[in-house]
Amino acid sequence: MERRSFFKICAKGTLLIAVSPYFIEGYLKADDGRLFKSFNRVKLLDCYGNPLKEDILQEETTYVFNYPYASTPCFLIKLSEPATKEIRLRDEEGNEYMWKGGVGKDKKVVAYSAICPHQLAHPNPNESFIGYIPKEKKSMAYKKGGVIVCASHLSAFDPKMGAKVLAGPAKEPMASIVLDVDEDGVFWANAVLGPAKFFDYFKSFKPELKEFYKNIRKAKKLVSLGAVVKPLEIYSKEVVIY
Ligand code: FES
């Protein structure tokens, strides 16, 4: 599918497809057991409701899907080079965990919770102050491109290395989403690895979540059907990253 069509269809809305919930055990493990949590196994979908395969993804583009909860945004990025394997990372308290690397044909595809670990900036339907800066561009937060930047207080994270902190006030990596690719080449989300901020996010953004999801229970609902992947510029009306 051409990129333009993908954008056009994404703008029109979403279509969900039922898939069986499935839990992966022992796929990845944080050393202290607290930084890895399995959620529903959820198929990623394009905007037509078709299972998402790698050939539809443009390199160096920020895509967003909601997982593991109906209102928690995640970034999906196909990098222009393979991600680094087996990166040891630490949360703010010093608990260590292992990020295994990218998935897909050349291990270029990565996914992270799009909630900034500093003060929880995140994309919402109105705007986003956080996103990926392509390799050839620069930002105020970091001297090179190929990084995720949060424009709220200029933190930068390395998506090739488990979203470890490169610059700014953030003290821990962005949490990563554990993906796998099935035998048909379709992407699935399975779990969250690293310092997820979901409960702080639900608490801090209650009014915003009520506005967008009508009631907080809907916002906190676990995703069990497919998760639709949209370009960030479609997910949020305005994207402000510098
Ligand atoms: S909220 Fe992202 S750097 Fe402060």
Image (spheres, grey):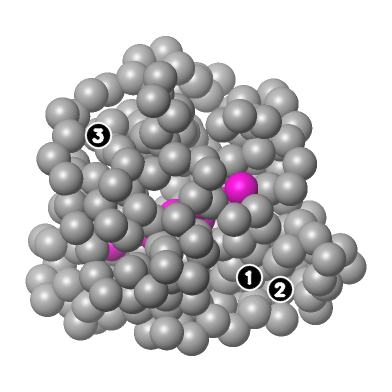
- Could you tell me how far apart the alpha carbons at marks 2 and 3 are, in whole angstroms? 33 Å
Q: Please name whichever residue, 132 or 203, is drawn nearer the observer in this view of the structure.
A: 132
Which of marks 3 and 1 precedes in the sequence? 3
Instruction: Specify start and end residues of the magenta stretch as a single range.
Output: 71-78
Residue at x 76%, y 41% (from the top left corner): 81
Specify whether 226 is left or right of 121.
left
The quadrant where residue 20 appears = top left
Query: In the image, what residue type sits under mark 3?
Result: Asn
Instruction: State whether the magenta stretch is mostly helix, strand or loop.
Output: strand
Residue at x 81%, y 71% (from the top left corner): 137
Is residue 15 positioned above or below 212 on the image?
Answer: above
Query: Which tag is nearer the camera, tag 1 or tag 3?
Result: 3
Would you name the residue on which mark 2 appears? 154
Residue 186 drawn in magenta:
no
Q: Is mark 2 within 8 Å of ligand 1?
A: yes
Would you name the residue on which mark 1 appears? 150
Q: Is mark 1 within 8 Å of ligand 1?
A: yes
Specify whether 41 is left or right of 170.
left
In the image, residue 168 lies at what x, y percent?
75, 66
Q: Please name whichever residue, 105 or 97, is drawn nearer the observer in this view of the structure.
A: 105
